């Protein structure tokens, strides 16, 4: 039942979402591309946006250490008594207040829209029977609010730093600074400087610190303006923040001290190494003695 | 109606309060508003203002974090109160009518409301 003739002819995602708002659609829009993502809708209002480009509400809560893994699991277990709504369970369990949860869900939805708008999608699919998001904002957000905020964010970053898409794939490294100077940087910026290793994109830093993509990009742009960061050359091949598994940085020598441990085929019991060095012991199993080094 | 909208309606009920706005102190994202907030400015502007003041205070060697910013005009006081939370803080911006209340009381009220907001 995903037959929606009007949305299929939509020019772009905003046009599609506005059309779905008109028909008060319930379901999800799965956007393919890099980063891509899923936009969850209820009566055409945006409940949540899940994209690999920025942490979701769940990731924000857990990665920032706002709620513990134990509290999260307790709430998950309690969802049965709150008609399957995790938000209600979290509030009932006293993990956090309704107001704070609203703030986190709204922030995650706006960040999702911003992250997805950094690149052009390759396609989309409208589905009515989609898995609901783990955490949702109810009532949802008007799609127009998301577009306006995204435009506003892009304008701010462009004025402050330059093209947002380029900023999103720039890897920053903290500049060396004197102790006196460091004392005058507030905690939030100090955490960000500690996380900027020159190997991670703003997205990676956001995931590491449990902060939204836009806030991280804005802070990085500000710190860059204060010359507290060095921008490493953005790789021209990238068109969007990389969501691929991380690979170790090239050119870094692997320190090898002494010979590498060697495997003897057929024998993998490390305890054999500690076998007594007395082949004359009658109780010695033949396997253990044969793994001893220097044995022909 | 969301919880935050209800909370801000309560803040608006305080004597002399004309308008109230709750925004993210870093991203400037507006979470809720009530009453006449035309004179406060956008969330982005408020966040920039708070960032600038906090940065200058740190540069000048001030200890601790920024608590609030008060801007007064002939008819109104604008109080921008920082609401600390785990993660990026929030800003509670309140517009007060000078005729109806005094600044000391309004500051106290705003700080109390800010404390209750996320509780």
Image (tube, coloured by chain):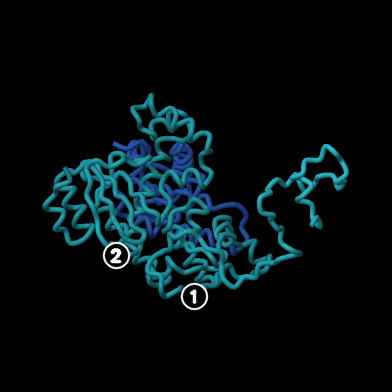
Chain colours: A cyan, B blue
In the rendered view, does A24 fall on the left or right side of A292? left
Q: Chain of mark 1?
A: A
- Asked whether A46 or A161 is in front, the reply is A46
Marking on residue A233: 1
Q: Residue furthest left?
A: A5
In the rendered view, does B99 fall on the left or right side of A255? left
Marking on residue A100: none
- Tag 2 residue: A120
For the point 68% across and 65% down, which residue is it?
A: A179
| Residue A163, horizontal then vertical, whole percent | 38, 71
| Residue B77, horizontal then vertical, whole percent | 40, 51
| Residue B85, horizontal then vertical, whole percent | 50, 44
Categorize mark 2 by other alpha carbons within 10 Å: few (<14), some (14-19), many (20+).
some
For the point 41% across and 63% down, which residue is it?
A: A241
Please check whether the numbered discs 2 and 1 fall on a single chain.
yes
For the point 19% across and 53% down, which residue is it?
A: A18
């Amino acid at each position: 039942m995903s037959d929606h003739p009007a949305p299929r002819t939509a020019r772009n995602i905003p046009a599609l979402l506005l059309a779905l708002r008109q028909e008060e659609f319930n379901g999800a829009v799965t956007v393919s591309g890099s980063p891509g993502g899923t936009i969850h809708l209820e009566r055409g209002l945006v409940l949540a946006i899940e994209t690999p480009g920025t942490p979701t509400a769940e990731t924000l809560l857990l990665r920032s250490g706002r709620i513990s893994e134990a509290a999260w699991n307790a709430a998950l277990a309690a969802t049965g008594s709150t008609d399957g709504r995790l938000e209600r369970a979290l509030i009932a369990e006293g993990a956090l207040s309704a107001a704070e949860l609203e703030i986190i869900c709204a922030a995650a939805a706006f960040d999702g829209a911003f992250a997805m708008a950094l690149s052009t999608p390759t396609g989309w699919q409208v589905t009515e029977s989609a898995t609901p998001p783990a955490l949702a904002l109810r009532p949802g957000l008007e799609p127009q609010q998301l577009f306006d905020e995204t435009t506003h964010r892009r304008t701010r970053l462009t004025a402050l730093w330059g093209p947002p898409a380029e900023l999103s794939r720039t890897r920053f490294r903290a500049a060396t600074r004197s102790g006196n100077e460091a004392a005058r940087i507030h905690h939030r910026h100090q955490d960000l400087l500690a996380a900027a290793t020159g190997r991670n994109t703003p997205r990676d830093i956001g995931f590491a610190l449990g902060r939204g993509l836009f806030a991280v990009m804005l802070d990085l742009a500000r710190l860059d303006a204060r010359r507290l960061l060095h921008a490493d050359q953005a790789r021209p091949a990238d068109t969007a923040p990389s969501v691929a598994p991380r690979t170790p940085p090239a050119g870094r020598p692997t320190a090898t001290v002494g010979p590498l441990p060697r495997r003897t085929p057929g024998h993998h019991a490390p305890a054999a190494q500690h076998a007594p060095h007395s082949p004359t012991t009658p109780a010695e199993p033949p396997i253990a003695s044969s793994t001893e080094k220097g044995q022909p | 109606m969301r919880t935050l909208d209800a909370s801000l309606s309560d803040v608006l009920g305080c004597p002399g309060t004309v308008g109230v706005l709750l925004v993210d102190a870093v991203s400037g994202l507006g979470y809720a508003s009530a009453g006449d907030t035309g004179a406060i400015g956008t969330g982005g502007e408020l966040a920039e203002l708070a960032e600038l003041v906090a940065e200058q205070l740190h540069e000048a060697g001030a200890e601790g974090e920024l608590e609030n910013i008060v801007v007064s005009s002939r008819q109104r006081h604008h109080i921008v109160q920082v609401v600390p939370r785990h993660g990026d803080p929030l800003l509670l911006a309140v517009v007060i009518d000078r005729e109806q209340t005094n600044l000391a009381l309004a500051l106290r009220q705003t700080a109390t409301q800010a404390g209750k907001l996320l509780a």
